[in-house]
Amino acid sequence: MKDRKRQYRRYMQEVKLIKRLNRASLNWWGRFTTINDNRIAKPNITDYIGLSHYKLYKTTTTTRWDSSNKSKYSPNRFNCWRSDHDRNTRESDKKEFLNILREYGLK
Amino acid sequence: MDLNSIHLPNDNWCVKDKYIMFKKLHNIPVCYIYDGIVYVFLDARIAKEIIRFTKYLIKNELGFYFTTPLASDPKGVENLDQEIIRSYLIAHSNSAFFYGFKKIGFNLIENMVQWAKYSKTNHLIKPMYDIVNDRVQKSQWNYYQNRELYLQEDIEIRNEFSSLYREIKILQIFG
């Protein structure tokens, strides 16, 4: 079998994402507010972009047994909600540092 | 002026019907031309591309205004002028647009005032500003964390909005 490259894998991920978003949009009941703050009656798959749904439906874990519980891309990306204190990443540290600077009026 | 005369950076961009589109899951409209003026959709879904496209328009000295993403709907929009001004202000409260336009040195509010003058809708700015400002300054006291939580988390945007109407008035008089 021909070896699959990164571009193909990205394409397949997008196909999966579209399938999930499509299913979600078909089952949507009620009004929908987009990221542009426009209320629409029935959402398309593109209306989910920028909202929490879009992140939620992305595949962020691997299928292999030894790494299925790890996050796939970076420690900043999760499927579920976690507080900033639990992360201990460079980005959260930077955010905290900026808040301290603002508190003392240095930024 | 024609849509085909605009340079498209890569394969994700295409011209379809009367719109230039950008592909993100599906084709999302970026702009159209009417009466020799380019109308760009202020769509936060593709904020990075909109900012890049604005930079291109400024560089080539093409006249342009922004419009609401609802205008691409073939069904049409009620109160289009009102919606356009609202989308200008909503985009200004969006952090991606706020810092993105700041970086390229473009004043979105000045463009809004120019558009209002062009379409004779200056009287719609104040009521739309009141609605969006209320939304930006909205806060709630959180008893568990013992602090005030704002709908718009960025303090810089909130401060900007509190004195924005004064800036609009100055631009209307001297701009």
Image (cartoon, coloured by chain):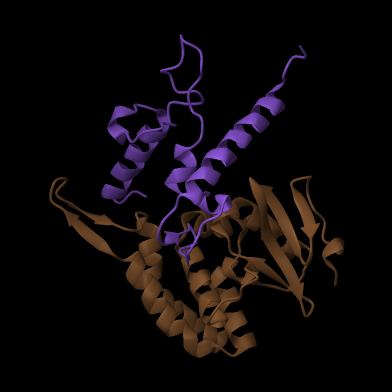
Chain colours: A purple, B brown
The image quadrant that residue A4 belongs to is top right
Residue depicted at x 51% and y 30%: A59
Image: A94 above or below B109: above
Residue depicted at x 46% and y 77%: B167
The image quadrant that residue A19 belongs to is top right
Image: B49 above or below A11: below
- In x, y percent, where is residue A28? 44, 53
Q: How many labels does the image show?
A: 0
Answer yes or no: is residue A50 visible.
no
Q: Nearer the viewer, residue B130 or A104?
A: B130
Residue depicted at x 25% and y 61%: B139
Quadrant that contains the N terminus of chain B: bottom right
Q: Which residue lies furthest to the top in this view?
A: A66
Q: Nearer the viewer, residue A11 or B3?
A: A11
Side of B17 where B173 appears, left or right: left
Side of B29 where A81 appears, left or right: left
- In x, y percent, where is residue B64? 70, 72
- In x, y percent, where is residue A92? 37, 34
Q: Nearer the viewer, residue B148 or A29?
A: A29
Side of B87 where B153 appears, left or right: left
Residue depicted at x 42% and y 74%: B164
